[in-house]
Amino acid sequence: MIETAYEHPLMKAYWKQLNSGFPQVREVFEDCMVEALAVLSRDGLSAYLDAAGFIGRLGRGVEPILVFLEEWPSVVQALGEEALPPVMDAVKAMHKSPNGKAIAPFLQTLAPVARRQHSLEQLRHYLDIALDLMQRTTGSIHGHHTTFPSPGLPHFFEQAPFLFAQLSMEGVRNWVDYGVRNYSRHPERQQEYFALKSADSRAVMQRERHGVLFADVERRLDLYLRGLWQDAEQLVPYSTAFDELRKPIPYYDRLGMRVPDVFDSRDGVKGIDRYRAVLAHMVGHRRWSGQIVADNYSPLQRMGVEFFEDCRIETLLMREYPGLKKIFLALHPHPGEDDCDQETMSCLRHRLTMLSRALLDENHGYKNPAILEFVGRFHALLAQGASSTREIADLALAFAARTRRQSDQYAKVYFDNTVIDYRDDNRHMWQFIEDSDDEDYFDDPDKKQKKEAEVQTLPPRHYPEWDYNSQTYRPDWVSLYEALHPKGNAADIDRLLQKHAALAKRLKRMLDLLKPQDKVRIRYQEEGSELDLDVAIRSLIDFMGGANPDSRINMSHRTSGRNIAVSLLLDLSESLNEKVAGSEQTVLELSQEAVSLLAWSIERLGDPFAIGGFHSNTRHDVRYMHIKGYREHWSDEVKARLAAMQAGWSTRMGAAMRHAAHYLEGQKADKKLMLILTDGEPADVDVHDERLLIEDARRAVKELDQKGIFTFCINLDPKADEYVSDIFGHRYTVVDNIQRLPEKLPQLFMALTK
């Protein structure tokens, strides 16, 4: 017994009655008792302490007793003290069976489940369902005593609050019954079912939900599309039940129009009418929306364009069918003008939602002068006809520039009363340059040719530049133009690789050591993905012989591999045309050889990587050439672009690094590496202060660090030590003998990523 430090005699008596030996319990006991004393009667308090003491002596560690002490007062508030006997009966039943590990998740979720029940009778039904699940899925060996716990019971308790938020008691019972009947003899599939990870589990839950189910109105919606809108697109349902934080929203793609699988009535609008509003909105986009190249818009600008375009579409829809206005306005939020505090959070969504309401509702009541001005400009534009997506995008950018605030960048965003859930996600509006990396692009020459033409005519993307003198950013200071690099002869690169065949053989031996292994087995696990047969047989022999069997009879697997995304950024400034001392080759030609070997190496490892080149002619003309995209393979197409590499102009490094990071940041990888290959310090013809672009590049490196991108510089300038450490710290290397670059570059990459 731990010595108590409680001075109040009553608290000492309570602690003595609890009779717990856990120091963690003593730390929270007084706080728990304060809450319990406010809720429980004298008899209830005594029963509470006795029950907690019993749970603490079950041999299941400190967690169950801590959970019970903290959660029980909330259960009593919801259902009363009479709930204790059936709950303790359930705890004892689990303790007597092999399901003792389920006690902690049962107690952990008991309070939220109780708050959904509203009656002791309902709680008893819940306990009956849980105990029935336990009895029907607890395993045994050849008719002997039960030794294997129910695989699904702990997962059921963990999901119980969510289940009762979606289903009635009858629905939960039917859902559990289906899982028991179909998976009682399949432990792994049973775990997936009760953890809501299997398709069957989700489908059965959807079947038990209330509201207007898509399956019940699919034919009516199809007729609605054909009759009113002359559109015969396939309708594809998706589930809204499994992500409470980030709920999916409607959208359409080449496979069909995606809508929720269930809609409840809301704000006086029936579920079927909510479906009609969603479909009408998507039909409007399909009729009147065009596409815009997205790469040169910031996320905040894209949001503004989407709000304006949504309102343009709905205005045109309401002209055709005026009855839609009542449904749209009923479902559209109407936030108050002063709801969002601009000093503490980002109010961009709030501001755009007010604007959206004002564009659709002449009785909006807002007095904001910017909103009133753009409402007038919007309707004047549409009075001239249907207008276009490009015209509405220009209007949206004007609104963004007029109303932009510093607080729009805050991490804390105001979301209340800003979600317009009948609108789709507008993915159809945007084209991205990185779309050129998808398989369809490369399989379709016409599409590829069209995309390359679009890339050549992209408007500039603007980036800030750091002014170290004033310690501030110059906003939108640099104009960066990007394009696919022109193509040359891929055979030139093949000849370079053949030239270094001996080096390639040495690299291949090193690469084989770095290649990821498929699976590594982890044995002796109490819970795992499959049964470890050798250990299970030994445990069974021990059990039959009267010895204590080893419960670690499962095994699991982990992938021993690499998860790295790489961006190789090449400085293509004029100085690369200089010849290497003692050689007939230029620095550019040696760089081509080195990059070819590096690309060949990374391709063998299977890491996603991109290659981009840059040079600049003042801040108004920074050029960024895409040589290889992340999803492209090391193909003749990529080799042809690399073979055509040319050098010219200057080295505005900071803007190029920020732009390369724009694409690298979107890769799903544990490690993101940016390699910068350069032969000199950052410089440009319009900058006379030598430190200015060095400090900007240094600032860009810090920005990339904050994004989780590791930068490393390979510098070919013998004098680089004078400035390169100011930019990259210790993350650089200087290659004094440039002729060894083809050998050094792949080896350096392998050293950085092994």
Image: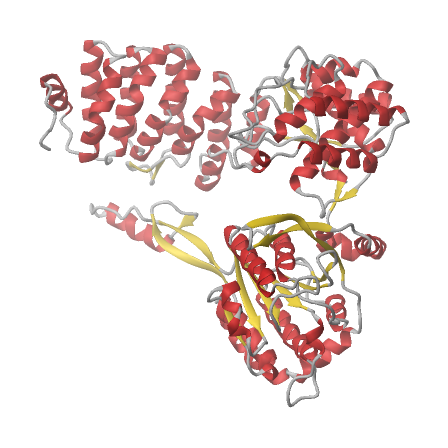
Residue under the point 59% across and 36% down: 406
Residue under the point 63% across and 64% down: 569
Screen quadrant of the N terminus: top left
Q: Residue furthest right?
A: 384
Q: Is residue 663 left or right of residue 66?
A: right
Residue under the point 41% across and 16% down: 115
- Of residues 359 and 31, the one drawn nearer to the viewer in this rendering: 359
Q: Is residue 566 visible?
A: no
Q: Position of residue 546 (x, y in %)?
A: 20, 45
Marks counted in the figure total 0
Q: Position of residue 44 (x, y in %)?
A: 22, 12
* Residue 115 higher or lower than 745, as above or below: above
Q: Is residue 707 visible?
A: yes
Residue under the point 64% across and 72% down: 595
Q: Position of residue 34 (x, y in %)?
A: 23, 18
* Residue 254 higher or lower than 162, as above or below: below
Q: Position of residue 590 (x, y in %)?
A: 66, 79
* Residue 465 higher or lower than 588, as above or below: above
- Of residues 294 and 254, the one drawn nearer to the viewer in this rendering: 294
